[in-house]
Structures are given as C-alpha cells and as structure tokens.
Amino acid sequence: MAVARLHAENRQIINLRALRQIKVGSDLGFRGKDRIRSSTNLMGEEAPEYVLNSFELAACDSESTGCRTATTVGNKMYVVEGSEDGSKSWINVKIFDKLTRSWVFPTVLGIKPVPLKGHSALLLKNGQLLIVKMDSTLDGCIWFLEVDSPFVKEQKKILGTEVVAWSKGVIGNAPKPIVISGPSGVGKGTLINKLMKEFPSRYGFSVSHTTRAPREKELDGVHYHFTERSIMEKDIRDGKFLEFASVHGNLYGTSIEAVEVVTDSGKRCILDIDVQGARSVRASSLDAIFIFITPPSFEELEKRLRARGTETEEQVQKRLRNARAELDEAKYPGLFNHILVNDDLESCYENLEKLLASDETADPLYQSSVKILKAHVSGMESKADHRTLIHCSTSSTNAATHSLLMLDTSSLKGGAPGRTRGLRVYALGSLGDGLNGI
Ligand SMILES: Nc1nc2c(ncn2[C@@H]2O[C@H](COP(=O)(O)OP(=O)(O)O)[C@@H](O)[C@H]2O)c(=O)[nH]1
Ligand SMILES: Nc1ncnc2c1ncn2[C@@H]1O[C@H](COP(=O)(O)OP(=O)(O)O)[C@@H](O)[C@H]1O
C-alpha cells in the first residue's frame, strides 16, 4: 500500500518538476557535450517538494568526459564533477557566484568519494548535498557534501575562504567510538592493549600522528604515524584531522582516516588522546563515549612513569606538571562520561569491559553485495518528513534491474569532517538480495 501511494504521489510531482527544471550551463563555460542537471533551491521553502524524474532523463552521464551536477543554494551554484580516466581519477567542487558571475574554488575538507564515475545530487534542508555515487556498492554509494551547514559556516570564518566538506553516509548505527584520556603513565596504553588482545575482532585502535620520536619498541603505523611537523601542519590545514593538540611539546593528532580505517573494518574505534583532544572531539561531529583514567594517587603516577623508563628526567618532570593540569581539567562538567581509577589493573580492566559492554547494543554494520549502477535522487523533505527517493538501476547478480530505494535521513548523526551515521534505507521497488527493510 505504502509503495503504491508513493508511486502515485511521485507521478504527480514529476509533472510539476518538469516545469520547474532550470537549464544551466550555456553561459558558464561548460562544453556543449557535457550534461548538467540542476536541482532547485529547497532552502527556506515550507511546502514539501519531491520529485521523481524518469530514469532515462535523470541518469547521470558516466562517459569518459565524466559527470557533473549543479545545485543552486541562494546566489551560489555548486558544481560537483568527477571522472575516472584509466588509472587517474579526480573529483572537483567549484562554485559559481551568480552575483559576481565568477567561479570560486572552495577549500574542500573531509575525505572525497574517489573514484566518482558518475553521481546524482540533491539538496537537503540542512545545507547538505546528498550525493549518490554510481557504479558503487550500496554501502559505499551515499555521500554528503556540506555546503551551507553550521560546520561549514564556522570553517568559512576560520579559513576566510569558501568551504565545502565531504562526509560518507553510513547505513545503521555502529557502536560509538571510545575516547580514552588520562595523564601520562596512568595505564591507558596497558588497558587498551589488554582490550585489543582479548577482543581483536571487536576493537580497533585509532593510530594517531605525532611529531615525537619513536620509543624503542614502537612501530611506525602501529603505535603512531611518526611524522614531520611541517607535513602534519599541512595535513591539518587541508582538513585531514579530526582533532590535534600540542602535548608535552610535541604535536599529536587523530586523522579522519585513522578513525575510518577502524570503523570501515566493522570494529569499534578506540582513541587514546589527551584532554585537549577529547574537548575537540566533543565539539566535533564524532559521537563518542569519553572515559578518563585517573591514578589512585599522584605519587603512584610518578612511580609508574619512572618505572616505565621511557622518558628522560626532564620529560618526566614535564609530564608530571601536565598531569596536574589534566587531572583538574577532567573534572570539567560534561566532558567525560566516566572516570575510572586505575589502582588494581585487573579490577580497572573489568570495570572498563563492563562499561563498554553496556553500550554495545547498536545495529550491526550493514554490508551488501548490491551494486548501484546508475541512480537519480529526489527528495521529499518537509519539517516532519526527511525521506529521499533513490531511483536506481542495481545489480546483485549478472542481471541489472531498476529499483526504488527510500532513504530516511531523519536521524542522521555526525557529519563532516568524518562520517554521517544513522542512515536507514528501505527498498520500495524490485530489489532482491534481502534488501527490504534494511
Ligand atoms: N590530542 C591528541 N592527543 C594524543 C593523540 N595521540 C596521543 N595523544 C596523547 O598524547 C599524550 C602523550 O602520549 P605519548 O607520547 O604516547 O606518551 P604516554 O601518554 O606517556 O604514553 C597522551 O596523553 C596521549 O593520550 C592524538 O592523536 N591527539
Ligand atoms: N594498575 C597498575 N598498577 C601498576 N602498574 C601499572 C598499572 N597500570 C599500568 N601500569 C604500568 O604503568 C606504566 C605506565 O603505563 P602505560 O600504559 O604506559 O601508561 P599511559 O599509556 O597512560 O602513558 C607501565 O609500565 C605499566 O606497566
């Protein structure tokens, strides 16, 4: 019934949409051969607007010339274009300012959906473009380009340029990442190692970048990505980091990729970062659980730090000074969800395990062999309704079929720079492979 009603509603809207379609491109420097589709501005419009163009009309061109979409938001038109040419693939976002009639090349933050052989775009009410990649699995086809979101507005002020930011859409809710902080020598590493050893397939460690020198037994890419300050600073400017901080005189940071490598492997991500980093993650799009590990006494902390024997006396002194500040900052209300005292190692570990188990009832990660060959997205967002239709041609076996998916964007969490989680996808049309009610 619901499916039939949707189809009926959509047929009416197609006609309205035909009248509203704007043809752009002739005066914008596009080559005549390129096809451009434009979506009208949904921002500020009260009435729900939704469309379903015919598949042939809407399907995006994925020839070797690539694929472009153009979406208007206020006085700006956001052009997303990408192509894969042999071994080279590229993706580009540019903005046409209709007032000055000039092109602007924005700072592009986040991880891009490369390769982008073809795509379809739709402007959502929250200032994000929904981008559906073609020739991609269902799990990898949904992306968001934030063009007018609070995050992008803030970055524009900081960077003084136009900014857009990518995030990948993740179907379902994976369990929240875990941020573990605490003073140097309290036992964070020991507890995390124990957890990873006992549950290697459940937890994965976010490998940070640091400018400090490796310790004797530390391996590059395993304990840290050891890097040069100038390289790390450039990557920070390029928006590759979720957070970073200067700790004990060195630069430390969590790259977006470090977290994504873990979550993409279906594991729960553990971050070992300092209190400043924890604050930044709190303010970011990453929806995490924050745990502070505290020592039974300051004397015991000093004893452990010295017994570890990895620091010079000067470094030990610096770490102890910073430890006092961190222990104070941890009391700041609303920063840490849990504070665990690491007195006896076994009982602290047991408490940590219990705490994590109580939060592990989230949905399993969704994996699908269904491939989106071509797609067209159309929205039906209103204040109460955040559903989007994806009209696509799919393939799960050798045969391609035309299908209709509905994407529920009402409970999205996170966003750029990182992942947009909590997407729900429902199959409305002919999709096999157990897709109904994902
Ligand atoms: N903000 C931030 N802090 C980090 C990161 N990685 C490690 N840290 C913190 O940097 C501090 C020093 O770490 P490290 O040099 O390994 O020394 P340790 O804590 O004495 O083992 C610790 O408080 C870590 O939690 C990161 O990516 N970001
Ligand atoms: N509960 C504990 N009791 C005694 N020693 C501990 C305890 N937890 C950790 N340690 C020891 O303290 C030292 C510092 O621990 P580590 O995990 O390296 O701390 P962090 O990662 O917080 O800097 C290590 O030598 C470790 O074996």
Image: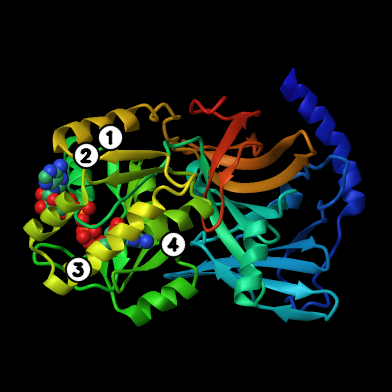
Where disc 1 sits, the SS reads: helix
Compared with 72, 120 (above or below) is above
- Residue occupying image coordinates x 49% and y 73%: 238
Q: Position of residue 295 (x, y in %)?
A: 23, 46
**Alpha carbon distance from label 2 to label 1:** 9 Å
Q: Which mark is residue 352?
A: 1
Is disc 4's CB within 8 Å of ligand 1? yes
Q: Amino acid at mark 3?
A: Gln
Dot 2 corresponds to which residue? 195
Q: Would you call the spot at circle 4 few (<14 residues within 10 Å), some (14-19), or many (20 or more)?
A: many
The residue lying toward the viewer, choosing from 266 and 276, is 276
**Alpha carbon distance from label 3 to label 4:** 26 Å
In the figure, residue 195 lies in which quadrant? top left
Q: Amino acid at mark 1?
A: Leu
Check whether the beta carbons of the residues at disc 2 and disc 1 lie within 8 A of each other: yes
Q: Position of residue 425 (x, y in %)?
A: 59, 34
Where disc 4 sits, the SS reads: strand
Q: Earlier in the sequence, mark 2 or mark 3?
A: 2
